[in-house]
Amino acid sequence: MAEPQIIYRDAPAVTELAVSLADFTAGSNGAAVRIEPGDDARALLPHLGQIKLVEVNFPAFGDGRGFSSAQILREAGYAGELRATGDVLVDQFVFLRRCGFDSFAPNKPLNPYDVKAAEGFFPEFYQKTSDGVAAIWAKRHQVTS
């Protein structure tokens, strides 16, 4: 389990050891799952009520498949902890948050001042995501995004 450095949840971080997606779908009764690049997050959809933590591994900063996994889970109603682990960089932070990540366990600790600066770097967005913030085009045309 990757220990989170940053948490955006009212509840404390989940401390259960995450099992692989393959082990979970093979019949594990665990409440924490780790998704690797190439794993299909949709395999978790029937079990969302059972899962307290989904760790999404980013083995390299250029591998963005974890963004899609997070979006799939949040759009399906997953409300548990969604933790980004691995090669998580501060310049990706705001986009990870927009996809629904609420805790972060980077390989290398992030500077808290850089994280705070990144949080407000982009005041408006073009794409809609699961964070509930209206896209700029929806605001401009006064429609729901």
Image (spheres, rainbow, N blue to C red):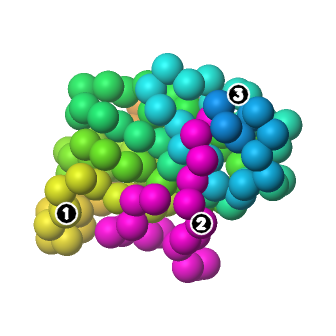
Q: Which residue is mark 2?
A: 16
Query: Which sits earlier in the primary sequence, circle 3 or circle 1?
Result: 3
- Disc 1 designates what residue? 109
Viewer-proximal residue, 38 or 68? 38
Spatial CA distance of label 3 from label 1 is 30 Å
Q: What mark, if any, has residue 42 been given in the picture?
A: 3
- What element does badge 1 sit on? loop
| Stretch in magenta | 1-21
Rendered residue at 39%/67% (across/down): 3
In the drawing, does residue 139 fall left or right of residue 123?
Answer: right
Observer able to see residue 59:
yes
| Kind of residue at badge 2 | Glu
SS of the residue under disc 2 = loop
Q: Residue at x 62, y 23 (%)?
A: 40
Q: Amino acid at mark 3?
A: Arg
User: Which residue reaches farthest top?
Assistant: 38
Residue at 21 percent of width and 47 percent of height: 89
Q: Is residue 8 magenta?
A: yes
Q: CA distance from mark 2 to mark 3?
A: 22 Å
Q: Nearer the viewer, residue 83 or 93?
A: 83
Q: Are marks 1 and 2 in contact (CB under 8 Å)?
A: no
The residue at 14%/66% (across/down) is 111
CA neighbours of label 3 inside 10 A, class few (<14), some (14 to 19), many (20+): few
